[in-house]
Amino acid sequence: MKERITGAEALMRSLEHQGVKTLFGYPGGSIMPTFDALYGHRDKLNHILVRHEQGAAHAAQGFARVSGEVGVCLVTSGPGATNTITGVADAMIDSTPIVVIAGQTPVNLLGTDAFQEVDLVGVTQPISKWSYQIRSAEDVAWAVARAFYIAKSGRPGPVVLDFTKNAQTEMVDYAPVELDFIRTYDPDPTIDEQAIQKAADMINWAKKPFVLVGQGVELGNAQEELRAFLEKGDIPCGCTLLGLSAIASSHPLNKGMLGMHGNLGPNVKTNECDVLIAVGMRFDDRVTGNLATYAKQAKIIHLDIDPSEFNKNVKVDIPVLGNCKKTLAMLTALLEEKKHTEWIDSFKEYEETEYTRVIEKEVCPKTGPLNMGEVVRAVSEATRNEAVLVTDVGQNQMMAARYFKYTRNRSIVTSGGLGTMGFSVPAAIGATFGRPDRTVCAFMGDGGLQMNLQELGTIMEQQAPVKMILMNNNYLGNVRQWQAMFFGRRYSFTPMVNPDYMKIAEAYGIPARRVMKREELQDAIREMLAADGPFLLETCVVEEGNVMPMTPPGGTVNEMLLEC
Amino acid sequence: MNKETKNTEPTMQVLPHREDLGGSIKSLYTIIVHSENIAGLLNQVTAVFTRRQINIESLNVSASSIPGVHKYTITAWTTQDIIEKVVKQIERKIDVLQANYFTDAEIYQHEIALYKVSTPEFQGNPMASKIVRRHSARIVEVNPVFCIVEKNGMSEEITALYDELRAQNCVLQFVRSGRVAITTSCFERVSEYLDMREEQYRQQKKEDNHE
Ligand SMILES: Cc1ncc(C[n+]2csc(CCOP(=O)(O)OP(=O)(O)O)c2C)c(N)n1
Ligand SMILES: [Mg+2]
């Protein structure tokens, strides 16, 4: 069955063997033999030429996040490889399965400071799930099989393959490799039934239980298990930024978003509940605020697939290790059917307070310039809340996360842990390839759009149907807000001088429209969604708007500021 | 580290009150790591310490009794809270088999040290050879210029010999190995873990084939 082919050809076969159909990349010297092999596989492997390797990495992330499959990048050595680093770090902290394949100087030149040589394995080891140098063609099939297995199993993450040039050109007897076992790595840990029993007892005992929903629910494909669990126990929940679409926004038990700019109810109630059940989340400081005052009154149960998350930030009473698809189902089986009506009703007061003091003003203003919140809500509703939301970073991100409505799983693609400006455009490109059947709406700020502006070229070439909604406030708004609140309004380098985005869009042949007036908003959104292909909608929003409510950094979750 | 195995009723009472993470007292921990023998792994293991600004006191890496498996013995001063997290983060690396931490009570540990002393000074000073004998050290090499004294034992014994020899002004060079340690518990975590993993895999394959 073995066939004698080059290492580069073996890579192509191995990728196809893994079911890869789409990859994002950029060629260069050390990866040329591989791009040459790719030329012969264009019928099966759709390679998207990005305009910057950072774009390739974020596109792979966007692809992976919406599809649940592994996103793949193919880049050259040296600067090509280092340009992907931000994406690798981002995928690590947000548990996104991607495989970055980078060229490398031939083995005989390694360590000599050869042209475009970078110690990529050394650089990426601390920020990847696995990083490996392929030094001979013999290694290719095994390394690719191992890379995909590691990237997508257990807690997903990025894998880097450093592909030396000699390994690309050498000949090898190729046969596909199957790999589903690594003796040092257990992606599906055995579930401790006693822990399940203890957790169930505690939940059954609780009068005021509260669930924190993290991205682990989406990664474990446990959205249905979560819903069944919440409904049987009649337990309200809050979602982390990355967990927002794990349960429909409209579900009566979904009390909204956790965190610094999340909703008031779930934050306040975190410090009132008697049992806190965290599912597939990692108690990030943007969620917990000051740890010394975080949920001190509660017993804490933590469901996670990664044992190193237990007691990392918050000491837990009952850790439950395992895939939450299984652990949630096992817990549900042991749950008593309950009603916590009074407890659930107690959220209302906070919902009303937040509505009158924050949301209403943000979403339904009668006068003044456009608000970010009203733009987001209008776009969300125009897609019947069914679109994939991609965000950049900053005020636009928080506003989009807060005011978008989620009805379907895997519908939020945002850079949570790393907070990478420039994420949205390339990630949205990736998302259109990952789920071509869905509408992809990318919200961004004027700062963030310019951080990967070059990817408009990719959108143009591919006609990738990204609906870009620029919320232009002529500021690095998020930083400006902090300067206003904590640095005495000293706007140090946050005003942004902007180009004419209509002209930029025009240069790329991307249809575009600028909206300044409230009356035009709906029509412009209709035009954007009706367009067959990409569209740039620039909304000129209030310049000095603030994202509220807010738990200031190091603050206490039940003491959110409602205005500033 | 033992899991509470009793599971009777109201769970609430059984659980001690949660305490804040962080704080508490520092002590010297011995961390034993078993991993695949793969280039670059040492970096990954030490990086976990560096990231948390923990100084590694000693580090010893060698082949273990299990073919293809390397053993790291690391000592570091830190708190129980931190060492627990460090060990879990090391274990999280794909090619690490197991990482555990121990206090001195849970291990038998030894170090070896070499002391190079000047022969004229050494022979001209009767105290020096007395010290060597009293510490049950051995002289493993003698030539007209220098002698080499070898001593193995606990860290403090090695330091004690060094201090005394130095007081005699005859030490030219001194080197000590990192600590090597063996656990004193009756079960062998690593080989049992490996057996368990292989068994699980066979089980899983069987189930998959039945489906
Ligand atoms: C790569 C990168 N650089 C800097 C930052 C710090 N930062 C966070 S939000 C922000 C402002 C973003 O401005 P803009 O894109 O216009 O969005 P807005 O907040 O105005 O909606 C900055 C500079 C970051 N998160 N990422
Ligand atoms: Mg802005």
Image (tube, grey):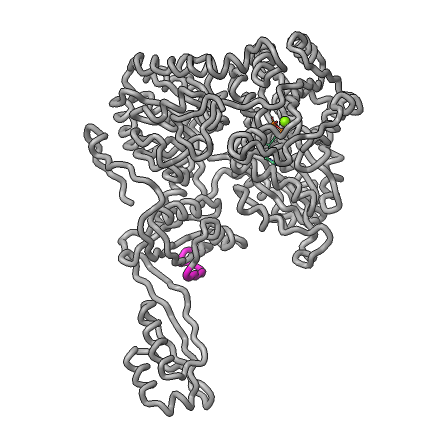
Residue at 68% over, 30% down:
A496
Taking the spot 46% from the left edge, 90% from the top edge, the residue there is B144
Q: Which of A144 and A339 is in front in this view?
A: A339
Q: Is residue A22 left or right of residue A410?
A: right
Q: In this view, does A106 lie to the left or right of A490?
A: right
Along the viewing direction, whichever of A382 and B24 lies nearer the viewer: B24
Residue A86 in percent (x, y) is at: 61, 39
Please, is residue A45 above or below residue B192 in the view? above
Q: Can residue A45 be seen in this view?
A: no
The stretch drawn in magenta includes residue A316: no
Q: Is residue A261 above or below residue A157?
A: above
Asked whether residue A103 appears in the rendered view, the answer is yes
Tell me what residue is drawn at x 34 percent, y 48 percent: B192
Q: What stretch is highlighted in magenta?
A: B57-67
Please state, as top left, top right, bottom left or bottom right, where the N terminus of chain A lies in the image.
top right
Tell me the quarter of the picture where residue A321 sits: top left
Residue B64 part of the magenta-drawn span: yes
Ligand 1 quadrant assignment: top right
Give left or right: position of A235 versus A183: left
Q: Position of residue A306 (x, y in %)?
A: 42, 37
Residue A60 against residue B105 in the figure, above or below? above
- Mostly what secondary structure, the magenta segment? strand
What percent of the width, then of the height, locates residue B181? 35, 61
Residue under the image location 38 percent in, 28 percent down: A278
